[in-house]
Amino acid sequence: VAALLDLLGVRVVYSEGAWRAVSVDPDGAAGKAGLREGDVIVTAGSTRLTENTLFSGSVRIDRITVRRGGTETELPLRR
């Protein structure tokens, strides 16, 4: 998960049962979509993220869902 999100311009840590953005490149796909430091990343594409989520082969992520302030928001990604 961390390697995939890094390609979108996000550095994450898994903490307290969730993937949290610790830094966001404003010029990366996630930063341009509105992801902020501290956001909890819930899904990448249609895949719900857990500590053990694995991606293999060719993966296309066109959106991420984040939890911010108790509300989940879908952010479409543009490259």
Image (tube, helix red, strand yellow):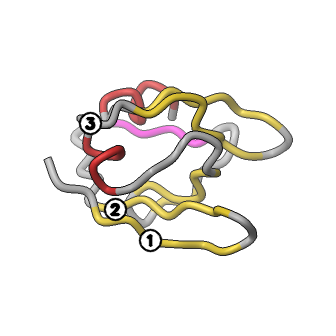
Q: Give the camera-side residue of 50 and 32.
A: 32
x and y percentages locating residue 7 in the rendered image:
31, 29
Camera-side mark, 2 or 3: 3
Query: Residue 25 sits in which quadrant?
Result: top left
x and y percentages locating residue 1 in the rendered image:
51, 35
Residue under label 1, please give it. 74
**Three-letter code for the amino acid on which mark 2 is drawn:** Arg
Residue under label 2, please give it. 63
* N-terminal label among 2 and 3: 3
x and y percentages locating residue 76 in the rendered image:
29, 65
Q: Are marks 2 and 1 in contact (CB under 8 Å)?
A: yes
Give the label on residue 28, or none.
3
Q: CA distance from mark 2 to mark 1?
A: 7 Å
x and y percentages locating residue 69 in the rendered image:
72, 65
Residue at 61% across / 50% down in the picture?
39
Q: Secondary structure at mark 1?
A: strand
* N-terminal label among 3 and 1: 3
Is residue 55 a member of the stretch shown in magenta? Answer: yes
Residue at 49% across / 64% down in the picture?
65
The relative height of residue 33 versus residue 46 in the rendered view (above or below) is: above
Q: CA distance from mark 3 to mark 1?
A: 17 Å
Q: Secondary structure at mark 2?
A: strand
Whether residue 79 sits left or right of residue 51 in the image: it is: left
Q: CA distance from mark 2 to mark 3?
A: 13 Å
**Three-letter code for the amino acid on which mark 3 is drawn:** Gly
Whether residue 11 sits left or right of residue 55 in the image: it is: right
**Three-letter code for the amino acid on which mark 1 is drawn:** Glu
Residue range highlighted in magenta: 53-57
* N-terminal label among 2 and 1: 2
Q: Give the camera-side residue of 46 and 64.
A: 64
